[in-house]
Amino acid sequence: MTRLAGKTAFISGGASGIGAATARLMVREGARVAIGDLQDEAGQKLASELGESAAFVSLDVTSESSWESAVADAEAQLGGFHIWINAAGISVPAAIDGASFEHWKQTMNVNADGVFLGCRAAVEALRRSGGGSIVNISSTLGIRGGSAFPAYSASKGAVRMLTKSVALRCAEQQWNIRCNSVHPGATETPMVEPYVKMAPDREQGLAMLASAHPMGRVAQPQEIAAAIVFLASDDASYITGVELPVDGGFCA
Ligand SMILES: NC(=O)c1ccc[n+]([C@@H]2O[C@H](COP(=O)([O-])OP(=O)(O)OC[C@H]3O[C@@H](n4cnc5c(N)ncnc54)[C@H](O)[C@@H]3O)[C@@H](O)[C@H]2O)c1
């Protein structure tokens, strides 16, 4: 397994869930990874587990100055980047009847502004290395609406169209940079724990999430990571601007 030999990846939201599973798989595939996250302790723990192939950098995706220092820190530790994963995100339910404006702004700030800043940093960094691949993590709710998730769904729709626009610009300019989005269905990570806990027990909570997915189960983070690694790798060398649902048939 050396599909990513010689490559270096930056992963926002890399300390947990899908981002962490992606960091682990990328290292197994021969890459070196910078894990950028708000969660210093979890990020540092994962970086030490992954050894010399990984470094943790403190990152708040909503802050321009944090991006600047995180990228400088990551480049100082690992050199130039060829792969960029924007996975940091938050999900808080609040239906339109009653959702506060603060809730909307916070969700858009992390999920949409954070990916905008991440893509801008990625294009600059990947151009310095001669090109590469950006993968943005949207959601099935970036393709279909969710009655309890108007802000989340809108933020993930923004990620979907931002991705295509970045892909077109990079292709037109012949920068050798691809940009695609992955749209996970319900995936068993800390993000879904609050929903799982709403049910009388864990099994019923997962079954409730699974019931919306034709395959009848939720995803494991490794299954999302596998799709991310495919799009990041040279196996996807002619794929740019696509949205890839990894959702057990939810969007079919
Ligand atoms: N788990 C799911 O069911 C699911 C489904 C569809 C899409 N997604 C998306 O996948 C991505 C990863 O989610 P996950 O399930 O792994 O959740 P998670 O909560 O396990 O991981 C999200 C990570 O993002 C980090 N983060 C949050 N705000 C940040 C900020 N301002 N700056 C830097 N880091 C920040 C968190 O610290 C955490 O490590 C998210 O974008 C999420 O919206 C998840």
Image (cartoon, rainbow, N blue to C red):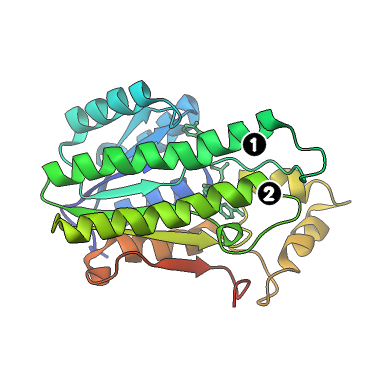
Q: Where is residue 172? Give x, y as percent.
A: 18, 60
Find the distance from the CA under tag 1 to the CA under tag 2. 8 Å
Q: Quadrant of ligand 1?
A: top right
Q: Which residue is mark 2?
A: 150
- Which residue is rendered at x = 15% and y = 36% of the image? 79
236 to the left or right of 116: left
**Foreground residue among 197 and 108:** 108
- Which residue is rendered at x = 27% and y = 31% of the image? 71
Query: Against 34, is 137 above or below?
Result: below
Q: Tag 1, which secondary structure?
A: helix
Q: Does the residue at mark 1 contact the one at mark 2 (Cβ under 8 Å)?
A: yes
Q: Quadrant of the C terminus?
A: bottom right
Q: Which residue is mark 1?
A: 104
- Which residue is rendered at x = 30% and y = 65% of the image? 240
Q: Quadrant of the N terminus?
A: bottom left
Of the residues under marks 1 and 2, which one precedes in the sequence? 1
